[in-house]
Amino acid sequence: MKTVAVDTPRQILKTVFGYDRFRGQQQDIIDCLLAGQDALVLMPTGGGKSLCYQIPALLRDGVGIVVSPLIALMQDQVSALLQVGVKAAFLNSTLTLEQTRRIEQQLLQNELDLLYIAPERLNTARMLALLAQLKVALFAIDEAHCVSQWGHDFRADYLQLSILHEQFPQIPRIALTATADDKTRQEIIQRLNLVDAKIFRSSFDRPNIRYRIVQKQNARQQLLDFILSEHEDDAGIVYCLSRKKVESVADWLCSKGIEALPYHAGMSNELRQRNQHQFLMREGVVIVATIAFGMGIDKPNVRFVAHLDLPKSIEAYYQETGRAGRDGLPANAWMAYGLQDVITLRRMLQEAGTDELHKRIEYHKLDAMLALCEQVHCRRQALLNYFGDVLDKPCGNCDTCLEPVYTWNASLAAQQALSCIYRTGQRYGATHLIDVLLGHKTERVLKYGHDHVSTFWYWYGV
Ligand code: ADP
Ligand code: ZN
């Protein structure tokens, strides 16, 4: 009897992708899918999620269907796969009708190993009917946190993906995300009906990334100093909150001799594509972007990610900084923040048309982000703790570890400050209160007789 040589995951890893060994839990995740079981994978950005479904899709009979929310991501992944000889294609709104038909034909003839598809396309009756005629190896739901209504990337189309389980109960599903807080995880399990899925949770630590958060003084200049002293000729991403700021920071960096290109949703598609391409293909390009940039960008040697504005949550901060150092070599996550950022973000939240409950959650996330900025102990411990990971010892590779923050026991000062507020009738602003506490005989202090309250010139007594 002739035996057919069946490849092992390890062989595919080597022959198709050119890697010698699996990273972290990749092998276990692949085995789980090969055994026909569902999996939920929580792994940080850059951890190597794609291979977890690509390899089983190659090994199992039929086509692997990958649901992915971003067109740029699909295109990148498919071209990378085609390059290594994997028969992959994508279906999304950029294709002509003719191209779409051709891919449908390939599917029907069982000619594809992997199909990337936008969720809104998958949810159509036409697509579901087509899938029912095919042999499907597995369903991969990438960026699965998009199903979370309280998360930062909610997409309504993701909610309907529970239909996959109803219509195709035999086919293993794998949901993947880099967002791992408890609430999001529970939501993914519940909404995608993954109660029986095996959960794979990798450590979220990215030890090669050095986290630094500084107070804003002249943020642009601080950024320039940072780039010139540590990252001349390196590829990096600078995040700003507004389109206007993206443009002005990019211009300014260029005027200082740094090759910086803007990227934001207000630019033409063509120009955006061109700038992204430059960033991916050439060395030493800095991209200045709003958060519209980056999801699915796979450039392994991004040496730094800088924030000139506070991200609105730790999840967002972690995902954005996670784009640095995917190659495992030393990289920097640098941020300048100021209290004005918090005020701006709060106002944006206030003005957003979301309901009260949602707003409360967003405020809470912003507060957690702020707490990370004001952290005086190891920043990495605080970050990981937020995601439910425990790091036993301070990391030694963040700003607070490298240069411990000067702290002092402020109990007495805080008591005096509160007392001063109380004694002056709880109606004055911070500047005036500080004048009273410091014993400044300003016109206002004298006018209100605040030079006679007991906390006047309290510092004198310390
Ligand atoms: P994620 O989707 O989790 O952000 P990717 O799947 O894009 O991560 O992988 C990140 C990078 O790591 C890619 O450049 C990928 O080729 C590489 N990679 C993944 N698995 C391995 C491995 N086992 N050995 C070496 N490199 C790997
Ligand atoms: Zn540390």
Image: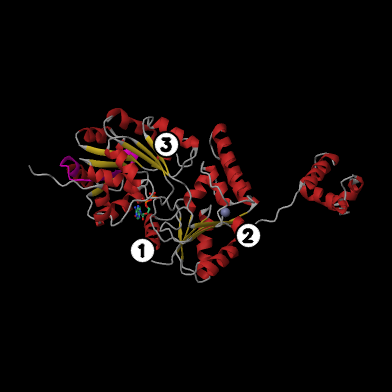
Ligand 2's quadrant: bottom right
Q: Which part of the image, by quadrant, shows the N terminus?
A: top left
Q: Position of residue 296 (x, y in %)?
A: 39, 51
Q: How many marks?
A: 3
Kind of residue at disc 3 = Val
Q: Position of residue 370 (x, y in %)?
A: 61, 47
* Residue 152 visible to the viewer: yes
- Earlier in the chain: of badge 2 and badge 3, it is 3
Label ID, residue 281 = 1
Say left or right for 89 vs 330: left
Q: Which residue is mark 2?
A: 403
Q: Considering depth in this image, is 60 or 348 the residue closer to the camera?
A: 60
Query: Could you say whether the residue bearing mark 2 is in a helix, strand or loop?
Result: loop
Q: Position of residue 181 (x, y in %)?
A: 49, 39
Query: Could you say whether the residue bearing mark 1 is in a helix, strand or loop?
Result: helix
Quadrant hosting residue 197: top left
* Residue 290 visible to the viewer: no
Mark toward the viewer: 2 or 3: 2
Q: Residue furthest bottom?
A: 257
**Distance Cα–Cα, label 2 vs label 3:** 40 Å
Circle 1/circle 3 CB separation < 8 Å? no
Kind of residue at disc 2 = Glu
Quadrant hosting residue 401: bottom right
Residue at 79% across, 47% down: 413
- Earlier in the chain: of badge 1 and badge 3, it is 3
**Distance Cα–Cα, label 1 vs label 2:** 36 Å
Q: Which residues are magenta?
A: 106-121
Residue at 75% across, 49% down: 409
Crowd band around label 1 with a 10 angstrom C-alpha radius: few (<14), some (14–19), many (20+): few
Residue 456 lies in magenta, yes or no? no
Q: Which residue is mark 3?
A: 147
Residue 112 lies in magenta, yes or no? yes
